[in-house]
């Protein structure tokens, strides 16, 4: 089956809104009152999987876990 499930644990803390990724629109980030933050891995794995032909079908949050569901087209 050409499907892939990716999950990661997140920390829920009270802090300012952070937006990451080298392609984030700075104007939109400022509109949201957020801070642009890029760290190694922000968008690395999704970019790499896109190059391999995977497309994100859905993304959701379950408690403190983020889940991406991908399909290789």
Image (cartoon, rainbow, N blue to C red):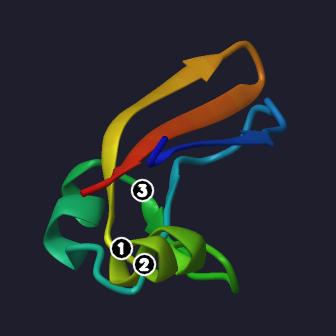
Badge nearest the viewer, 2 or 1: 1
Q: Position of residue 28 (x, y in %)?
A: 18, 61
- In space, the residues marked 3 and 1 are separated at their CA atoms by 27 Å
Q: Nearer the viewer, residue 60 or 53?
A: 53
Query: Badge 1, how many Cα within 10 Å: few under 14, some, many 20+?
Result: some
Write down the residue under mark 1. 50
Write down the residue under mark 2. 47
Q: Which element carries disc 1, helix, strand or loop?
A: helix
Q: Which element carries disc 2, helix, strand or loop?
A: helix
Q: Which element carries disc 3, helix, strand or loop?
A: loop
User: Eyeballing the image, is 19 above or below 63?
Assistant: below
Q: Quadrant of residue 13?
A: top right
Q: Quadrant of residue 44?
A: bottom right
Write down the residue under mark 3. 34
Q: Position of residue 66 (x, y in %)?
A: 64, 34
Q: Residue at x 49, y 24 (%)?
A: 60
């Amino acid at each position: 089956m050409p499907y892939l499930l990716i999950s990661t644990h997140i920390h829920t803390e009270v802090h300012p809104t952070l937006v990451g990724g080298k392609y984030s629109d700075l104007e939109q980030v400022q509109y949201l009152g957020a801070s642009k933050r890029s760290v190694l891995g922000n968008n690395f794995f999704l970019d790499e999987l896109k190059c391999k032909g995977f497309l994100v079908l859905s993304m959701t949050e379950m408690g403190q876990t983020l889940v991406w569901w991908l399909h290789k087209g």
